[in-house]
């Protein structure tokens, strides 16, 4: 006789019925509101963005405006995607929104979906926000000076392993903005610190080290991001798990640069 337990995978294949409460806003100057949608037969194996694709197909078939949201590679690499899901940046798992799967939710759940909330990230439409403030912070100092010509031998400039490991960890930042969205102060210190740290730890980043940190921090302030109070939500929500130690490194570099007389460009 066949066991009454049945197929252990049957439940995971059953479609879910969900209630979605989504922020809809036609433009940056238009007042937005939460709009409720019902969606049925959602596979637990879908990604969160695939679920939004299904919703948008339904809206288009009904003649309604689809929900605008940011996305690109959908492989957790580009950093384009990002929404607040039930009040958490990228949702209940420490990953990117595109790599969050619907099995993280239960049949019958109500899911609130909102854009990143920060003065420096103005809403473009619905869930899509303008994150060019990050680009301007990088432009202020996130580069190195290198001579043109043939690339040098990789082993010509030894780098201590501890420094190279820390630089690589900081360089994994994808600039998604979850740190800003999760921070009660809307601070971008984890992002800026990651960009400052991964260059400042390497020999190639030394010529601009002092100017880099003062200019990037100054640009961060000009963009309207809040101050860091070491709450730690930034690191807890970072899909790459970047440590708050990078903020300590930035503060160390900033104090050293200011003592050396470095001043930000006006």
Image (spheres, rainbow, N blue to C red):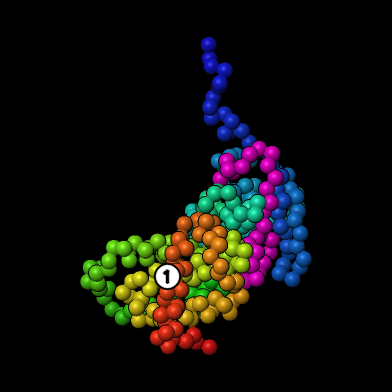
Residue 126 belongs to magenta span: yes
> Crowding near pointer 1: few (<14 within 10 Å), some, many (20+)?
some
In this orientation, which residue lies closer to the viewer: 178 or 135?
A: 178
Residue 177 in picture, x, y percent from top left:
55, 64
**Range of residues picked out in magenta:** 101-127
Residue 130 in sight from this viewpoint: no
At 31% from the left and 74% from the top, the residue drawn is 203
250 relative position to 108: left or right: left
At 56% from the left and 45% from the top, the residue drawn is 101
Residue 259 in sight from this viewpoint: yes
Residue 220 in picture, x, y percent from top left:
54, 76
Q: Quadrant of residue 45?
A: top right
133 relative position to 170: left or right: right
Q: How many numbered marks appear?
A: 1
As displayed, is residue 117 above or below residue 207? above
At 61% from the left and 42% from the top, the residue drawn is 105
Residue 63 belongs to magenta span: no
As displayed, is residue 238 above or below residue 192? above
Q: Which residue is mark 1?
A: 249
In this orientation, which residue lies closer to the viewer: 79 or 173?
A: 173
Residue 23 in picture, x, y percent from top left:
71, 57
At 50% from the left and 59% from the top, the residue drawn is 235
Q: Quadrant of residue 233?
A: bottom right
């Amino acid at each position: 006789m066949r066991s009454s337990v049945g197929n252990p995978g049957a439940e995971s294949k059953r479609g879910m019925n969900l209630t979605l409460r989504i922020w809809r806003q036609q433009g940056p100057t238009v007042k937005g509101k939460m709009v409720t949608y019902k969606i049925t037969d959602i596979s637990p194996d879908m990604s969160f963005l695939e679920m939004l694709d299904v919703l948008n197909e339904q809206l288009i078939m009904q003649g309604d405006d689809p929900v605008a949201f940011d996305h690109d590679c959908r492989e957790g690499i580009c950093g384009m995607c990002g929404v607040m899901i039930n009040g958490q940046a990228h949702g209940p798992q420490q990953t990117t929104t595109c790599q969050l799967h619907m099995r993280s939710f239960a049949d019958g759940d109500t899911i609130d979906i909102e854009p990143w909330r920060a003065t420096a990230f103005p809403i473009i439409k619905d869930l899509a926000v303008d994150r060019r403030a990050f680009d301007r912070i990088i432009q202020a100092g996130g580069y190195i000076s290198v001579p043109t010509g043939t690339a040098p031998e990789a082993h010509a400039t030894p780098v201590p392993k501890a420094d190279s490991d820390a630089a690589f960890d900081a360089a994994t930042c994808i600039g998604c903005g979850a740190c800003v969205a999760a921070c009660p102060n809307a601070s971008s210190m984890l992002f800026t610190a990651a960009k400052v740290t991964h260059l400042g730890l390497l020999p190639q980043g030394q010529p601009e080290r002092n100017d880099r940190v003062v200019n990037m921090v100054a640009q961060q302030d000009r963009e309207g991001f809040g101050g860091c109070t070491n709450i730690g939500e930034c690191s807890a929500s970072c899909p790459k798990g970047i440590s708050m130690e990078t903020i300590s490194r930035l503060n160390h570099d900033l104090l050293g640069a200011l003592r050396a007389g470095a001043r930000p460009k006006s």
